[in-house]
Amino acid sequence: MRITFFGTGTSFGVPVIGCHCAVCKSTDPRDRRLRTSALIEAEGQNILIDAGPDFRSQMLRSGTEHLDAILLTHHHKDHTGGLDDVRALNFLERCSLPIYCEEYVQKSLKMEYSYAFDAAKIYPGSPRFQLETVCPDKPFEVNGVEVVPVRAYHGRLPILGFRIGSIGYITDANRIPDEEFEKLHGVEVFVVNCVSHRPHPSHFGLNQALEVIDRVGAKQSFITHISHALPGYEEFAAVLPEGVYPAYDMLSVEI
Ligand SMILES: [Zn+2]
Ligand SMILES: [Zn+2]
Ligand SMILES: [Zn+2]
């Protein structure tokens, strides 16, 4: 199986519009971060986690022409804002695309993309979503591939991380309840968010992210949802412990 980081930037992306800091002006391509998303390829299935505003460019630059499902961690725009572009896949495959998410996320999608749920089909060119409800304690399957939802919190908002085989993926969290760590036991690759050195009201700070990484104990851990408040790639990579790496866009990890 394989994970490819489609985007590793915080909600603003990096560089940030109008910012002239050293990270935003860096010429290292690893410091150019689209909004956070990742493709997991397992047993012939293409499973995308989140589809933010950069979804279209991420599909094009990775040459991805087929998805079996999209899993949504939560309803924020940096994770859902690209879903209108599912139209291209609906057109290619002549069917709707399964979107797995919690009920409150579905409610939000029905508001944000109301034209796609209009029973009268006034606008025939709208994206076709097949909504599948995820409960945090119920593993589910995407065409035979088991997905284990992991409950985490983003400030007070309950969100989902996912375990697929030996990959654990959690973004936008600042707390993972003790009992959820059990679901991550034995993962080989672990991905977790961190936006800045200091704890943020709804995201892990660096020390908190490193504590979580240590507790999960994967062979390789990657930090995502990175902002320009963290150092540029080279400098950041140099201060992280062994086996912990900053993710960067289009990094692919095979397991
Ligand atoms: Zn986010
Ligand atoms: Zn900046
Ligand atoms: Zn968020």
Image (cartoon, rainbow, N blue to C red):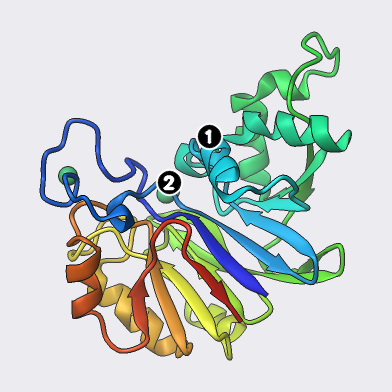
Identify which residue is drawn at 25% across, 55% down: 28
Q: Nearer the viewer, mark 1 or mark 2?
A: 2
The residue at which mark 1 appears reads as 81
- Secondary element at tag 1: loop
Left of 116 or right of it: where is 218?
Answer: left
Which kind of residue does numbered mark 2 sit on?
Answer: Arg
Can you see residue 219? yes
Left of 25 or right of it: where is 217?
Answer: right
Residue 215, horizontal then vertical, whole percent: 41, 88
Closer-to-camera residue (132/22): 22
Identify which residue is drawn at 64% across, 25% down: 113
* Disc 1 + disc 2, Cβ < 8 Å: yes
The quadrant the C terminus occupies is bottom right
In the displayed structure, 196 sits above or below 43; it is: above
- Secondary element at tag 2: loop
Nearer-N-terminus badge (1/2): 2
Identify which residue is drawn at 25% across, 80% down: 240
In the displayed structure, 44 sits above or below 55; it is: below
In the displayed structure, 76 sits above or below 221; it is: above
Left of 240 or right of it: where is 153?
Answer: right
Q: Residue furthest left?
A: 21
Can you see residue 163? no
Q: How many marks?
A: 2
Residue 96, horizontal then vertical, whole percent: 83, 37
Hey, which quadrant is residue 214 in on the image?
bottom left
Q: Is mark 2 within 8 Å of ligand 1?
A: yes
Q: Residues within 10 Å of mark 1 (few under 14, many from 20)?
A: many
The residue at which mark 2 appears reads as 35
- Check residue 128 in the rendering and tell me which mark sits there, or answer none: none
